Image (cartoon, grey):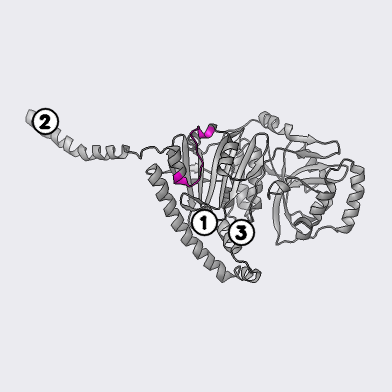
Amino acid sequence: MNGDFAKYLWAFILLTLPMAACAQEETISTPELTWQQMNTALGVPLFSDKDFWQEDVTAVGKRLQWPQESLTKTLCSYRLYAEGEQKFLGVKAYSMALYGKDGKVEDVSIALCNMGDFSNWALSTIDDAKERKKALSLDTKEEMMNQFRKSYRMNLEAIVKNLTNALGKKRRTRFSTGPERVTADRWDWKDLSFMLIAQEDEYIHLLIIPKSFADSEGKLKSISEDDLKKLLLPNVEKRPNGDVVITQIPMINQGEKGFCVPATFERLLRYMGIPADMYMIAMAAETGVGGGTRMDILDDKLYQIVIKAGRRLISTGDGLNIYTISDYVNKGIPLVWTLEVDPEFYQGKDSAMAKRMADRKGMTDPKVWKEILKRDIKLFPKPEPNYLEGHACLIIGYNKETGEMAFSDSWGPSFQERWMTIDEAKALTNGNLKVITW
């Protein structure tokens, strides 16, 4: 019996040795990089000797030299549209954004490969207007897509290789980007997680988030109705001239892309305390090359994430009018407005809106302003909607005495607050107003 036992024992040891060796191999990890080495690997001075999540976000933005995009009492962001000139992890980066909350870093969002950015960058390299128009032909678009697919595959391979060399073997994980749940490649360093999200031949996006948030797979914290009201009501500003305006809405600059819908909803979601990223929203909504968002798809996906966060996404259903606008604005709730733009009226330094805002600056007496408005309306007749110029923005205020509403475009700080009459807005409106509420 003792001899048989010895044979079985040795057989067991011999059989388990390879398994033990494999297990030992898997526990071997890449030595942890210093913050200086991480900055070298990334190609930007993102980190310092301080705890990243406790570092002053303004100091990080200045160190990166990314322009400040937005600043409210609690939220801020810094964004650099590098247009393919700046490299991150060894490949061209198109948009690099740093988000902060309560003065600390909240997350980092890097668009490393995106068809919308790629096509706009490619067109911007063509100086001649005729050649740019030619580049929009179907044949050239197909050629551009082929170039993008090649760029996508090369970039993805390089990014994975560079992250693996720096941080060791990746692992596959599920993660909620907000509008949808995706599969991501994940690398951890200290208390950070690098989440690489790639959609075949469409986009490559990197999120740098707290490790605890990655561990929860992006699960959001719900908020009660009372807490949400306390959060929003202090943002309503009532001015002596009759203007009632929602303040503290973060700004997003959508860049040259037609990302007005994703950018508008990112602003709204972040204002309502829900983390969001316009690139992730755009991809979830199947936003096309250069723009064009499937609202039917987006509505369903946003509805799910808003419900999980303890809020509701609804359509007002009663059209654009001063009573609906004032009802929501008085509660600190912005409204999403979809419209068809009249470019001569709405956009550009010589537009009616540009002149209107110059005249309205410093308005103190609504009765005097109403007379000026009458003159302006005679000079610039009611706008004519152009169905090729679809747009979305936020309605953020009203003035009952002058019959105006305030709106905010996602084109940077200069477009944070603009005004037009309700009648002018009705002429451009396309679809119901949408709100996130309790």
Position in image of residue 292 (x %, y %)? 63, 57
**Foreground of the two, 381 or 159:** 159
Residue stretch rendered in magenta on the structure: 40-53
Residue tagged by mark 3?
290
User: In the image, which is nearer the foreground, mark 3 or mark 2?
Assistant: 3
**Foreground of the two, 89 or 27:** 89
Position in image of residue 81 (x %, y %)? 59, 51
Q: Nearer the N terminus, badge 1 or badge 3?
A: 1
**Number of numbered markers:** 3
The residue sitting at 66% across, 29% down in the picture is 227
Residue 127: image quadrant is bottom right
Q: How far apart are the two marked residues, 1 and 3, measured between alpha carbons?
A: 12 Å
Q: Is residue 28 magenta?
A: no
The residue sitting at 60% across, 63% down in the picture is 123
Assess disc 1: are there few (<14), some (14-19) or many (≥20) residues with their C-alpha within 10 Å of its C-alpha. some
Q: Which secondary structure, mark 1?
A: loop
Position in image of residue 105 (x %, y %)? 56, 36
Evaluate whether residue 3 shows in this view: yes
The residue sitting at 65% across, 37% down in the picture is 272
Q: Which secondary structure, mark 3?
A: loop
Q: Which secondary structure, mark 2?
A: helix
Residue tagged by mark 2?
5
Circle 2: residue type: Phe
Assess disc 3: are there few (<14), some (14-19) or many (≥20) residues with their C-alpha within 10 Å of its C-alpha. some
Residue tagged by mark 1?
202
Circle 3: residue type: Gly
Q: Is residue 41 magenta?
A: yes
Evaluate whether residue 1 shows in this view: no
User: In the image, which is nearer the foreground, mark 2 or mark 1?
Assistant: 1
**Foreground of the two, 91 or 312:** 91
Position in image of residue 300 (x %, y %)? 61, 47
